[in-house]
Image: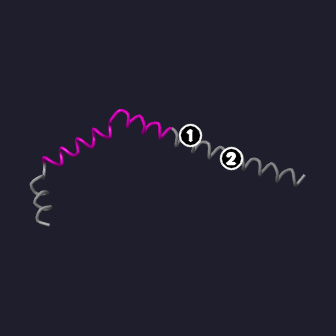
Amino acid sequence: MKGLRALREQSGQATLEFLLVALLLVAVVVGLGALAAKLRAGVFSQHAAESASHALTSNTAGSVGDVLLY
């Protein structure tokens, strides 16, 4: 009887570990899908372009001076 109980506990532990790994895998796949959707939509490229144009217009003269004087 004691051996059967130990076997049940191990089986339950394996099931729980499988469930946790499966949930983690599903979360990773969903996250990668969301990232791929954002990449296809061009959100990151648009953000980079907006950031670059903003950086070029605000402090261009000071930045160029810092680079050339270094």
Residue segment shown in magenta:
30-57
Q: Position of residue 28 (x, y in %)?
A: 52, 43
- Give the residue furthest to the bottom: 70
Which amino acid, mark 1?
Val
Question: Which residue, given by chain and number where applicable, does mark 2 sit on?
Answer: 16
Q: Is residue 63 left or right of residue 50?
A: left
Q: Quadrant of residue 66?
A: bottom left
Q: What is the secondary structure assignment of the residue under circle 1?
A: helix
Name the residue: 10% across, 57% down.
62
Q: Determine if the magenta segment contains residue 51.
A: yes
Mark 1: give few (<14), some (14-19) or many (20+) Cα within 10 Å: few
Label ID, residue 44: none
Q: Determine if the magenta segment contains residue 33.
A: yes
Q: What is the secondary structure assignment of the residue under circle 2?
A: helix
Mark 2: give few (<14), some (14-19) or many (20+) Cα within 10 Å: few
Question: Which residue, given by chain and number where applicable, does mark 1 sit on?
Answer: 26
